[in-house]
Image: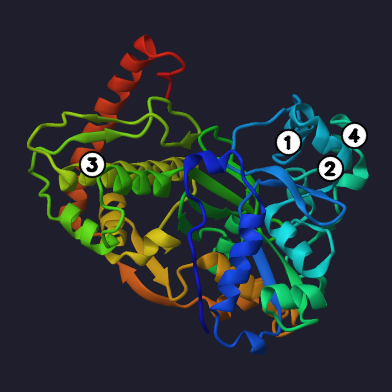
Amino acid sequence: MASSGERIIGYPSELHNWDAQFWTQTLARLLSRLPGRDQLTAVVISGNGPTIVAMDKTGQALQPSLLWLDPREHRLPDTNSYFLPKAAWLYQHIPLLRRKVKCFLGCPEFLSFQLTGEAVTTTPGEEFSQYIWTPEEIRAYNFNPALFPPFVQPGDFVGRVLPHAAVEFGLPERIPVFAGGSDFLMSLIGTATLEPGRTCDRAGTSEGINYCSAAKVHDSRLRCLPHAIDGYYNIAGILSSTGRLFEWFREISGQSNKRYDTMLEEIRSIAHSSAYPWFFPSIKHGAAWEFSRGMFVELGAEHGAAEMGRAVVESIGFAVRESMEILEENDCLIDTVCGCGGQAKNSIWTQMKADICGKAIEVPVIQDAELAGCAAVGFVGLGHYASIPEAAEQIVRIHARYEPRSNEYERYTERYNRYREVYSRFRSAAADVLPGSSGSS
């Protein structure tokens, strides 16, 4: 019915000293601008992960919270949890926190607690729980089990909005709060990527090419996790920082205030035959594509922001194509991709992706698929639908389809093959001269 959004990540230094109150303050501010909130009948929250928030007995977050992209952790060998190593790092490096912590929560669960006073942990199923925490791994890390709240599943009742929270957040008092979960799981629901063979491209600060499979896939270049639907698996090519790369380029090129469609139109106007540079996002290369220490190659004095931008967006598009090719090498055959997230809101970029990858891309009416996924589980919680797949099939509607253009695909294929060849050579060269780099592919 209505939406309100706000960017809350500022300087990179904030990412490594994250105050969870940024979330609560921003949520209250957004709700104050949302029309018709007195008519709301339920709340569902999703959020990034694996993020760990240490909370004290008063319900306040102890700083810092470790975001999903924060590399600090203390991992025990032969363990699966993505969350416990972050909690272990906090215990090891901030002794004062050890004495004050009441429980550890994920990002969406922290916000749910602020509304209800109920501490829970959301998991789509028992098989997925090993990647959050298990009693055996909690003991292995020598944690008190009481620090880790019980599991609930998406759509389960968590609690009701407390009177003081209703005042703070501007919500109707006593309306139910249902469990949501990690943003990537909600996006699978919000794109109806819930049957084997369906694929979605979830693109925001990070990006994932997610394929629904009936069987596990074993390939170090892909991430295989249990799906939001029990019995299925989410096979994903992880591109950890595509949106972050583009925002970095906007900033360093002085275009932060320029409209995205204007930037993409200028980038698209650079002809394939032009001598524009290459952009390599990292000298490292492994299971997850990342932007860390990038480089422009063959950058000339005649090149401007449009040529450099063309190189940047091509590097992202080529990474998406490579992920799709790796999936198909593992019998995850892709016909049509459902695009969602911030990148899917730009028609120029979506068409370029279709042309680069040679795949049709469909964009739903609600591009913020996490929100559509939250709506689906909320309606299940309220009893309007019997199951999450049934709700998703009714809620997800496609409003645009972008077909790959054969002539553009051929041109991009030629440049893609050349890009991979040149990139491989520069990675190998960088491995010999730069510390901490790897030339392995």
Tag of residue 80? 1
Q: Secondary structure at mark 3?
A: helix
Quick one: label 2, few (<14), some, or many (20+) residues within 10 Å? Answer: some
Cα–Cα span, label 1 and label 2: 9 Å
Q: Tell me which numbered mark, 1 or 2, is placed earlier along the sequence.
A: 1
Q: Give the percent coordinates (x, y) of residue 314.
A: 27, 45
56 w.r.t. 38: above or below: above
Q: Tell me which numbered mark, 4 or 1, is placed earlier along the sequence.
A: 1
Where residue 418 sits, quadrant-wise, is top left
**Residue 17 left/right relative to 112:** left
The answer to the question of whether label 1 and label 2 lie on touching residues, with beta carbons closer than 8 A, is yes
| Residue lying at 58% horizontally and 77% vertically, measured from the top left | 32
Residue 317 can be seen in this image: no
Cα–Cα span, label 4 and label 1: 13 Å
Q: Which residue is mark 4?
A: 139
Q: Secondary structure at mark 1?
A: loop
Where residue 405 sits, quadrant-wise, is bottom left
Q: Nearer the viewer, mark 3 or mark 1?
A: 3
**Residue 308 left/right relative to 387:** left
Looking at the rendered structure, the kind of residue marked 3 is Ala
The answer to the question of whether label 4 and label 3 lie on touching residues, with beta carbons closer than 8 A, is no
Q: Tell me which numbered mark, 4 or 3, is placed earlier along the sequence.
A: 4
Looking at the rendered structure, the kind of residue marked 1 is Asn
Comparing 201 with 178, the one in front is 178
Cα–Cα span, label 4 and label 3: 49 Å
Q: Nearer the viewer, mark 2 or mark 3?
A: 3
Q: Which residue is mark 2?
A: 134
46 w.r.t. 71: above or below: below
Cα–Cα span, label 3 and label 1: 37 Å
